[in-house]
Structure formats: C-alpha cells, structure tokens
Image (cartoon, rainbow, N blue to C red):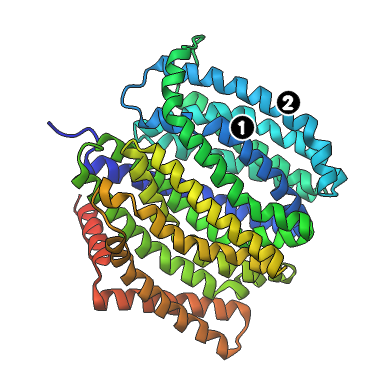
Amino acid sequence: MKHPQSKKSVFSALVWKFGERFGFQLSQFLLQLVLARILDPEHYGQLSLMAIFISLSNVFIQRGFNTALIQNKDVTDDDYSSVFWVTMGIVIAVYTGLFFAAPAIARFYEMPDLVAPFRVICLALFPGALNSIQLAKVSRALDFKHIFLSNITAILVAAAGSITVALLGGGLWALVTQYLLTISVSCLVMWFSVGWRPAFVCHIQRVKVLFAYGWKLLVSGLIDTLYQDLRSLVIGKKYDSGTLGYYNRGKHFPQFIITAINTSVQSVLLPAMSADQDDRTRVKRMMRSSIMLSAFILFPMMAGLAGVAEPLISLLLTDKWLPCVPYLRIYCFTLAFSPVHTCNLQAINAMGRSDIFLKLEIIKKSMGITALVIAVFCFDSPLAIAMTGVVTTLISCFINAYPNKSLVNYTYFEQMKDILPSFLLSAVMLGVVLTVELLHLSSFVTMLLQVAVGVVVYFALAALFRPEPFRLLVQLLRSKLKK
C-alpha cells in the first residue's frame, strides 16, 4: 500500500510552503522597509513591547491544540469545532485581562501613550483563534496553497492601509494597522477558500483527549515565547524604546529569512513524520535530508547577510538605523541553526513524545535565563544581552539532538557531520566577502560586489568539493526539471 504522505506529496508541500513563507516574508520585509524610512526607531520599540504580550497570549490560544489537531491520527470535524469554541472562550478571558492591564503595562515601561494602541492591537487575538483552526486543517492535508493565497492577499491589504496611516502622520498607529489587517484579512480569505465553518458542538471529552497531548506543548510554547521575548522585555525596561527598536530591527533581518525556512520545515515535517512515526528509518531519512538542505541553503544566507550588514542598512533604512548592525550580525549566527533545532524537535513531537519536548524546553530555558542574568548584572550592555543567544544556541543543538539518538537513531555527531560542510563553506565565503570592504567603495557598489563575490565563491566551492547536501539538491532539481 502506498503511504498517504508520499515523497512526492511531501516535496510538493514543502515547495508550496517555502513559496508561501518567502512570498509572505518578502512582502512583509519590503513593507517594513518602507515604514521604517517613515517612522522612528521608538515606534518599533513600542510595537515590540506590545507584540510580546500578544505572543504570550497566543501561546494559550494557538499552541497545544493546534499541534494536537495536526499530530492526532483520528480527528473529526466535531473536534475542530470543539477546539474552536474552547479557544474563543480563552480569547475572551485573555483579552479582558489585557484590556484592564494596559495602563499598568504602560506605567511600568513609562510609555503613557501605549494604552489605546495596546487595547486595539490585542483585538487581533480574535481572528487569530479562528485562523489557528484553519491552519491546522490545511496542514493535515499538506494543502498550503490556501495559506499562500490568504497571506499574500493579507499583506497587500495591510501594506496599503499601514503606509497610508504612516504618511498621514499616524506614527505607532501605522504599525497597529498593519498588524491587525494582516491577521484579519488572512483569516477572512481562508474563511471562503478553505470552506470550514465551526459547528455548534463542543465535545469536552474530545477536547480533554487533545489537551492531554497538547498541554505539554502549550507549556513548552509558553516557556519558549517568554524566553525569546525576555531579552526585549529587559532591554525595553533597562534602556529605552529607541535601543529596543535597534535591537529588534537588527533581529528582524535574519529572522525574515529564518521564519520563512523554519516555518516551512515545521509545517511540512510534523504531519509527514507523524504519519510515519512507526517507521524510524523513514523519519531519520526525512530528518537528514531536511537538516542538510536547510543548512546548505541557510548558512550562506546568514553569512552573506552578516557580511553586507552595514551597506545594506545604510541603503535600505538610511543611516539613522546603523546602530542595529551589531545586533543583526549577532542574530545571523544565533538564528542560523534554527532549522537544525526545528527538525529535531519536530521529530520528537511526531514520535508522540511531547513529554521529552517539555523537559528539553525547561532545561534550555533555565540555561538561557542564567546566561541572561549574568549578562545583565556583569556586563550591563544590550550587546551582551544579545550575545547570550549565541552561547545558548550552540548548547541547545546538543540538547535538542540528544533524544533522537534513541528515538530515530540519529545521533548528535551524525547531525554535526551533516551540517559541517555547509558551515565551513559559508565561513570561507564570509571571510572573502568581508575583504571587499577594504576597497572603501560606495555602499551600493560594496554591497553589489559582496553579493556577487559571495555567490560565486560559495557555489564554486560547493561544485569543487561536492558535499552531500549539494549532491542531494542537484538530484532534486534534476528530477523536477525532467517532469
């Protein structure tokens, strides 16, 4: 019997998901370039603070149940509806709490003008709850065309609305408009394209069954989100909104690339590996291919971005944003390993071991918080706070990979061996790219020359040494061209 998640269907889904993520992220990236030239770093610092509380709230609303709906083998339409109504109840409670907490949050960060924008932007939680169910439904079927359509439409509408508000002098309200329109329009498009409607049923017993799996992921997600945003919370309180704006803008550039790749890998691998959870050899094969291809594509992207950081920021955002360059370079290295983390964690989830997932999160975050406390009290520098991510991401590679030695027989040293060729090629490429700055050319010419040199050097080295991910990529491309 042919397996429902064939190699062809998984690859096709991955292509669609990459297309959707890169299309959406590129559109958002371009929109942020336009808005950043109009708005000030302080506006982005204020948005970052508001987004932290929304992200934490979304853990309760979208994590746990969403993954449980994707991973569970037997899910009915009543399950989707039951989860939807429970989720909406959570949204109402969370929004009420945030509404009344807004003045206290504004006082704590000494930003009195934050109250009204915060209460408005939190309304995005409502369409976000519905969208999490829609995403679970299409993810199970690996049908990412609907997500592509909804997200591209949403970003175009959000761009028109937010740029208009920014040009009219709306300041922070332009960013609030963009955030609200993006999630609302995406949800609306999927309402018509996916065709799913919640029925007026709520089987609490089924919700309990799904929650029995999902609660560990919910707690893991809460720990991870709080940890990821902890640096921003500390910088926003200890320094000012301008410094927070530079920090988050520096993180935004590499995150643009990472989110597209990481979300694609996560969305496709979880349902695919869940369907194959009884075949450890097949799961390992999928993991190896994903890790090698992600590293071969992502490492040179991150190295190249770090190399062209200064002329890039000067050209795209103007010199007022140059203080974000050090943060950009730090996060290029920190986030480069994200797909490795994702592949390992998704394999653990797919094997039904959310208990291990939770334990790993507790260990990693305890380590990360310790590093953050040391940076805050011993170095007193926002750059030192950002550097804690470099230390923790390297250690986390080992922690995330360790359980898969027994779960799928894919050891840490095998994984490092699989990504080492891409890392070395990227390191050599970065060294060559940085030497271009010694010519002291204009920012535009320097960046163009760096990009050209970087691409030529990387692929020339890959063609010369022919590492396994390069051969795998060539095989995939040839098979697609023949069809």
Please rate how many residues cluster around mark 1, counting C-alpha atoms within 10 Å: few if below 14, some from 14 to 19, many from 20.
Answer: many
Q: Which residue is mark 1?
A: 184
Res. 261 in view? yes
Which three-letter amino acid code belongs to the residue tagged 1? Ser
Pinpoint residue 240: horizontal percent, then vertical percent. 79, 59
| Residue at 55% over, 52% down | 366
Residue 301 in percent (x, y) is at 45, 66
Quadrant of the image occupied by residue 471: bottom left
Counting residues from the start of the chain, the first of labels 1 and 2 encountered is 2
Quarter of the rendering occupied by the N terminus: top left
Q: Quadrant of residue 275?
A: top left
- Judge from the rendering whether residue 402 lies leftward or rightward of residue 48; answer left or right: left
Give the secondary structure at mark 1: helix
Tell me which amino acid carries mark 2: Thr
Residue drawn 38% across the image and 79% down it: 457
Looking at the picture, tell me which residue is in the foreground, 289 or 72.
72
In the drawing, does residue 54 fall left or right of residue 66?
right
Q: How far is disc 1 from disc 2 in space, using C-alphas? A: 19 Å
What is the x, y in percent for residue 436?
Answer: 52, 85
For the residue labelled by badge 2, is the local secondary structure a helix, a strand or a loop? helix
Question: Which mark is on residue 96?
Answer: 2
The label nearer to you, 1 versus 2, is 2
- The percent coordinates of residue 330 (x first, y second) are 57, 68
Direction right: furthest residue = 112
